[in-house]
Image (spheres, helix red, strand yellow):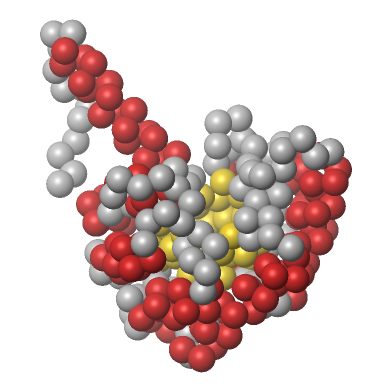
C-alpha cells in the first residue's frame, strides 16, 4: 500500500466497531515479530522502548533524528500501517510529524505534558496542518498526561481536565484522544460518554480491564507502551536466572528470528 492508503487504513481501524489492539514495538526485529503474528492489523512504536534500547531515558532525551530514524526503520519492516510515539513533538510538532510521514509513518501519539491548554491545542493544530500539507490522512492520537502527571489532584478535577482537553484536541483535528494511566471502568465510561465511542484510546497496564471489556466500554484502541518491552525483558531475565541455576531454555520457546 502507498503511504496514503496505509493512512486511510489506520483511520478505518480507529473508527471500526472492533477494538484496535496494538502491541508496541521498539526496533526492527520486534516489528517483524509482531507484524507476522496472526491478528496484527497495525504496529505502534513506544518512545520509552526505543529510547531505552538506545541507552536514553524516556522524555525526549533521545535526539529527534535518532527517533525518526528508528520509526522509519520500523515502518520499512512491514506493509501494515505504523503509528509512532513521538512524545511531545520535540519542540516542533509540525516539523516532527512531517518528518515521520517522510519515513513512512501514518499515525502518531502527541502528548501534552500537561502544558497550558492553549499551547497544547496549538501543537495539535500544527501537527494536523503538517499532515494536511503532506496530503496524508494522518491518524493523530492526541495524548493527555492528566493522570500520568496528575500528582495529588482530586480525581474529579483530573477527569474534568481530561475531558476539556479531549474536546479541545478533537476540535483541533486530532483523530483520537489518548488517556494513559491506570483507569477504572467508571472513569473509562465517563470519558467515552463525554467524548464519544471509538474516540478514546487507553493503555493496557497491570490492573486495567482486558481488551474484551474495553471493547464493550466503547474504547477505540488499546496499546501497551513500555509494557511489551517489559514482558520481553522479563523473559530474558528469567532465562538468565534459570541458566545460572542449572536450567536452560524454557519449554515452548519458538525460533522467531
Question: Which quarter of the figure has residue 139?
Answer: bottom right
Spot occupied by residue 7 in the image (x, y as percentages of width and height) = 46, 77
- List the single residue furthest toward the top: 245
Task: Please say whether residue 22 is visible from this viewpoint.
Answer: no
176 relative to 9 in the view: left or right: right
176 relative to 189 in the view: left or right: left
178 relative to 95 in the view: left or right: right
Q: Residue at x 22, y 27 (%)?
A: 252
**Which quarter of the image is occupied by the N terminus?**
bottom left
Question: Which quarter of the figure has residue 74?
Answer: bottom left
Q: Residue at x 39, y 78 (%)?
A: 99
Where is 247 relative to 115, above or below?
A: above
Spot occupied by residue 78 in the image (x, y as percentages of width and height) = 28, 66
Q: Residue at x 27, y 21 (%)?
A: 238
Where is 230 relative to 142, above or below?
A: above
104 relative to 90 in the view: left or right: left
Question: Which quarter of the figure has residue 77?
Answer: bottom left
Q: Residue at x 59, y 60 (%)?
A: 111
Task: Please say whether residue 72 is visible from this viewpoint.
Answer: yes
Where is 65 relative to 150, above or below?
A: below
Amino acid at each position: 500500500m502507498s503511504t496514503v492508503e496505509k493512512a486511510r487504513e489506520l483511520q478505518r481501524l480507529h473508527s471500526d466497531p472492533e477494538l484496535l489492539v496494538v502491541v508496541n514495538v521498539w526496533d526492527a526485529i520486534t516489528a517483524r515479530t509482531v507484524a507476522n503474528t496472526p491478528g496484527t492489523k497495525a504496529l505502534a512504536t513506544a518512545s520509552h522502548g526505543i529510547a531505552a534500547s538506545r541507552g536514553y531515558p524516556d522524555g525526549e532525551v533521545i535526539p529527534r533524528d535518532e527517533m525518526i530514524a528508528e520509526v522509519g526503520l520500523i515502518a520499512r519492516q512491514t506493509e501494515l500501517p505504523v503509528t509512532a510515539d513521538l512524545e511531545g513533538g520535540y519542540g516542533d510538532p509540525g516539523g516532527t510529524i512531517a518528518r515521520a510521514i517522510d519515513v513512512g509513518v501514518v499515525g502518531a501519539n502527541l502528548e501534552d505534558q500537561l502544558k497550558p491548554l492553549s499551547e497544547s491545542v496549538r501543537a495539535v493544530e500544527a501537527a494536523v496542518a503538517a499532515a494536511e500539507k503532506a496530503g496524508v490522512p494522518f491518524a493523530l492520537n492526541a495524548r493527555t498526561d492528566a493522570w500520568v502527571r496528575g500528582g495529588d489532584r482530586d480525581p474529579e478535577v483530573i477527569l474534568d481536565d481530561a475531558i476539556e482537553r479531549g474536546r479541545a484536541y478533537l476540535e483541533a483535528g486530532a483523530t483520537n484522544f489518548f488517556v494513559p494511566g491506570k483507569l477504572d471502568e467508571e472513569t473509562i465510561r465517563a470519558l467515552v460518554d463525554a467524548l464519544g465511542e471509538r474516540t478514546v484510546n487507553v493503555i493496557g497496564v497491570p490492573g486495567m480491564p482486558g481488551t474484551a471489556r474495553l471493547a464493550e466500554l466503547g474504547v477505540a484502541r488499546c496499546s501497551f507502551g513500555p509494557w511489551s518491552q517489559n514482558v520481553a525483558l522479563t523473559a530474558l531475565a528469567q532465562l538468565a536466572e534459570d541458566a545460572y541455576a542449572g536450567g536452560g531454555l524454557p519449554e515452548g520457546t519458538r525460533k522467531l528470528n
